[in-house]
Amino acid sequence: MSRARPALLLLSASLIPVIILAAAMGWFFISEQQKAIDDDLRSRAVTMAATLQRELKTQIQLLSLVADSPRLDPPISRPGFAETARRLRERVPAWEQIRVSDEQGEVVLSLPPLQDDDGRRVVDVESHATVIRSGAPIIGNIAIGPNGQAAFAIRVPIQRKDRLRAVLSAVIRPAIVTNLLYAGGLPSTWSVWVVDGQDRLVASTGTPGLAGKPAGEFASFSGNGFGEAALKAGGDLRATEVALEETPWRVRVGLPIAEYDRPARNATILLVAASCFTLLLSGSAAFLFQRELHSRNRERESMANWQRMDALGKLTGQAAHDFNNLLMVFQSGVEGIKRRRNDEQRVTQLLSHMGDGVARGKTITQRLLSFSRRSNQGAAHIELDVRLNELEPLLRQAVNDTIVMETSLPDDLWPVHVDPASLEIALINLLTNSREAMENGGRVTISARNVPEAAIEDPGLHGAFVALTVTDTGTGIQPGDIVRIFEPFFSIRKDGRPGLGLTQVHSFAHGSGGAVKVTSLIGHGSAFTLLLPKSNVPRMPRQEIKPAIDLPRTMLIVDDTPSSLESLRLSLEGLVSTILTAASGEEALVVLDRNPQIEAVVSDIMMPGMSGIELAEEIARRNPRLPIVLMTGYSDKQEAGVEITRPVVAKPFDNQELARAFNTARARSSDNVVQLGLPTRS
């Protein structure tokens, strides 16, 4: 089977373009069929118009011969006119009436004679006026006569000695046109109708009795030449329109849209079938290619997985070692306090060591979380010049005494919006990377510059950024390694030990909505540039007056862990007058209902049933003015980037941090999130 896969892959790949070409040719062929249908529709409409034009022209010629007859020489004899008209009606039964009208449109002679209640003026005044004005024969518009019957008139001038004396008209029922339409030999499913210059219906097939009414009563038509029509009785047509010569009449012919679209439907079916088959072949080819690739890389992947697991084990062991050291500090402190409770100096010293252990443990936890963090949930407004000045002692510890560290920041540097703890870890990782690249000493420079949106070349980035660059004079990075240095566990160290430092830098930059760029020249050093998003908050004044911090007098503590709940209660005794507790969100709501004097609530986030976030929302709905602070050791929602609109303190925290959180909660706005202890969000 392994030998057959390349052959099957080649066969699938070669059939795909053949099928695509066949589908394209089929589509072109069926499109040509549709064009042929349009040509046939147009040809039949032209033929129908020519037939009607010829019939009407014959009627005009016959009536013109009568107008030139001596029997109509003025003054016209009534008996002579009656005899001539009688003979004409016998020869041309379609002529319902023959009339003579004067220049003002008054009917002076008519056969059959007009009844007393019939109007004496012509009905189609427009066509009569056109004959008087032009002196040329004309086909009038369809009109409804006094008796309610539709008809149209053929009018010719009666001229003697180059002077128009009167107008001779033959009134014709539209049945003569209808008979011509049915005799045109159109398919039974097709429709044809004739409209006059006022878009009124002269004649049509399929629906009798509509002559003289607006053409829309039979079918609406839109288009120029070809267009779509909708029958009033139901059904859509592909229609075309042809105008008659020397008359405003038009002939419209249409066939059912289903017949017209049948080739297109066939083409669609063919295209869908070809697409499905192509997708099937493409999927087979991709599957075979994947199997082939997987087969060739299986051994190499197995080796890489073993290396990753080995590195992960070392990393886990290091973290366990650090935490065990911290636990030893607490164990020793607890034992020492038990034995020397009355030795105030000794207890104070032990408590100081335990406090330092808490701070170190908190730092280790934040650094571990920064490796897996994918969101910018801890972002806060940071002024880099102030922050780097505070971190300078810590950053100098990341390099040894043989390395000179310099900081170069402009006075007008923009503030940024990132996670403060992750920024600190990223800088330490970059400086550690530079230190390892300069075993014999050198120089490392931390610089920054403003990058406006117009200067951003990365299409995936939007907005303004601050470029924070760490440059060293080390050995540099090989070009082939630059594309891999951010991969987890990839290392260019001489001892081959894997690390996650640059992986954390990459995760921090992209999680912040920015990017990290690296340039290097072998033998001259490397430069890592973090593009950090600009903060929309203006710079803080340098002499900031800190607000007063105080704790509420009556507080409710909510935590599902009894030891954590009791520890916080004990730490606040003496600072808060009345402390109430609850082990769940549901219990907390009951306590709040029974004790309206409660001034503030502090709740754990992760609790079974109702979470701290849900509890805060319910409390805010009941009492929007009640300050609420959330606390957490770890929150999956928070790590996923869910915005929490309450102050959050990270366990472990001290009373000062909690007091600052309550101070923030009192003045918070609904669209800001502030985290204390953990990286803050603003």
Image: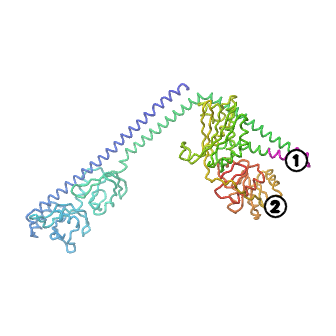
**On the picture, is 482 further left or further right than 238?**
right
Please identify the dominant SS of the magenta region: helix
Label 1 amino acid?
Val
Classed neighbour count for the residue bearing mark 2: other residues with Cα under 10 Å, few (<14), some (14–19), many (≥20): few
Q: How is the image coloured?
A: rainbow
* Mark 2 / mark 1, whichever is N-terminal: 1
| Residue positioned 81% across, 61% down in the render | 577
The secondary element bearing badge 2 is classed as loop
The secondary element bearing badge 1 is classed as helix
Identify the residue position indicated by label 2 in the image. 577
Vertical relation: 167 (above or below) 193: below
Viewer-side residue, 357 vs 199: 357
Viewer-side residue, 116 vs 520: 520
Q: Position of residue 428 (x, y in %)?
A: 69, 40
Mark carried by residue 195: none
Contact? badges 2 and 1 (CB < 8 Å): no
| Residue positioned 18% across, 56% down in the render | 57
Quadrant in the rendering for residue 578: bottom right
Identify the residue position indicated by label 1 in the image. 347
Classed neighbour count for the residue bearing mark 1: other residues with Cα under 10 Å, few (<14), some (14–19), many (≥20): some
Part of the protein shown in magenta:
335-356
User: Which quarter of the rendering shows the N terminus?
Assistant: top right
Q: Position of residue 457 (x, y in %)?
A: 54, 42
**On the picture, is 663 further left or further right than 182?**
right
Label 2 amino acid?
Ser
